[in-house]
Image: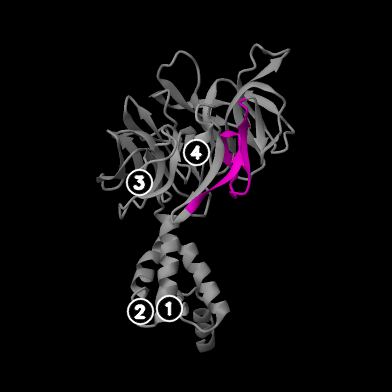
Amino acid sequence: MHLTILLAIALQEPSLDQLVERLGSDDLDVRTAATAALRKAGAEAIAPLRKAAGDANRERAARAKELLEDVLWRVKGRIAYWAEGTKPHPHPMGTRAIWVVDPDDPKPVEVMRGIYCGYSEEIRWIPGTRRFLASVDIPREERFGLGTFPQLWRGEPGEAPVAVGGGESDFALSPDGKRVASVGGVNTICVDGKPITARFWKVWEPAWSPDGKTIVFRGGRTKDDRVVDGSWGMYRCAPDGTGLEKFCDFLSHAVFTPDGASLVAMEYTWPQQPKEIRVVDLATKAARVIGRGADFDDVPRLSPDGRRVAYARGGRVIVVGVDGKDETDAAAGRQVTWSPDNARLAYARDGAIHVLDLATKRETEVAKGRLPSWSR
C-alpha cells in the first residue's frame, strides 16, 4: 500500500510552483519541459512567474522573467492601431503610422511610420509571434504624383519594418502564419503571390479555414469580360485553387468558427443600410441570423474561443452568442476587436482606443487612434 501511494504521488502532474522551481535546474531537458508546461498553462502561470522573477536565484529569475513576458504576450496580447506619425517624412503625404500598445501599461510604441495609404487598413498579427503584417504604401520622394503602390510590410515593436511582398491589397494569413492569401489586382485570389483562381470581376476578403485546407472569398465571375448574372457571392476552394465553388449569396467579411464547420459573416447587399450578421453551416449551407442592424461599413468579430460575436450597431458595440442568444449592448464605439483571452474588447470612439473588461464593465482609454487589432 505504501509503495502504491508513493507511485501515485510520483506520477502526479507537477504543480505550477514546482515547474517554476525547475526553471533553475542545471538539466537542460528539465528546464525545457518546465518551460513548455508553464507556457501551456497560460494565464494560470502568470502569478507564480511574477513571484519567481524576483527570486534570489538569478538564473531562475531571469528565465522566469523572460517566460513571463512571453506568456503575457500570448494571454493578454498587444493592440496595434492606426494614428498619425510623430516625425516628418520626406513625402508630404506620408503622415500615417502604425502603433502598438500594451493595454495594461499604456505606453504606445510607433512601429511603422511614413505611410501614405493603408489599403484594407487591416493589421493582421502573425499567430504566436510579436509581428504583424499590413498592406501599406510607404512612398519614395521620386514617386510623388505617380499613384499608390501597395506592399506587404512586417512590423514588430523594437525592430525596423521590413517589406515582404508587393502588389498585395486585401490579404489573410494562414492559421500557422506561414502563408498569405491575397487579392491580386482586385481580380484574382493569390496564395504566396501566385494566382490560384481564374479571373473574376472583383474579389475581396479572403479567409482561411482553421486547418489551412480551405480559402473563402467574395466575388463575381466573368465571361467575355462581363459579370455573369447570379455569380456574385461567397466562394471557396483549396489553397491550390482546386474545388472552386460558390456556396452562398451576398455575404462579406467571413471568418471561420474554430471547429471549421461554420462561417460568421455579414450580409452584403445594396443600398448601404443596416445589415444582418449570419452564421452559415458549411455542410448544409443553411444560414441563420444572430444579429440585426449592423453598421454596413464595420466588420463583425468572432471571439477567439468561437462563442461570441462583437459588431457595431448604430455606433454601439454589440456582443451576442453564436447561437443568437444573450445579446448585450456593451459600449459606445466601433471597429471592435477581441483580446486573446476572450475577456476584453478594444474599440475606437472619439478618436481614441478604449478597452472594456467584460466581467467588471471597467472601460479604459489606452491610446489615441483608430482601427485597433489585438494580437493572437
CA distance separating discs 4 and 3: 32 Å
Q: Report x, y in % for residue 302.
A: 46, 38
Residue designated by label 4: 138
Q: Nearer the viewer, residue 7 or 168?
A: 168
The amino acid at mark 2 is Asp
Majority SS type along the magenta span: strand
Q: Secondary structure at mark 1?
A: helix
**Marks 2 and 1 in Cβ contact (< 8 Å):** yes
Q: Find the magenta span and give its range.
A: 160-186
The amino acid at mark 1 is Arg
Residue 162 shown in magenta = yes
Mark 2 or mark 3, which is nearer to you?
A: 2
- The mark that comes first in sequence, 2 or 1, is 2
- The mark that comes first in sequence, 1 or 4, is 1
Q: Secondary structure at mark 3?
A: strand
- The mark that comes first in sequence, 2 or 4, is 2
CA distance separating discs 2 and 4: 46 Å
Q: Secondary structure at mark 2?
A: loop
Mark 2 or mark 4, which is nearer to you?
A: 4
Q: Nearer the viewer, residue 108 or 87?
A: 87
CA distance separating discs 1 and 4: 43 Å
Q: Report x, y in % for residue 373.
A: 42, 42
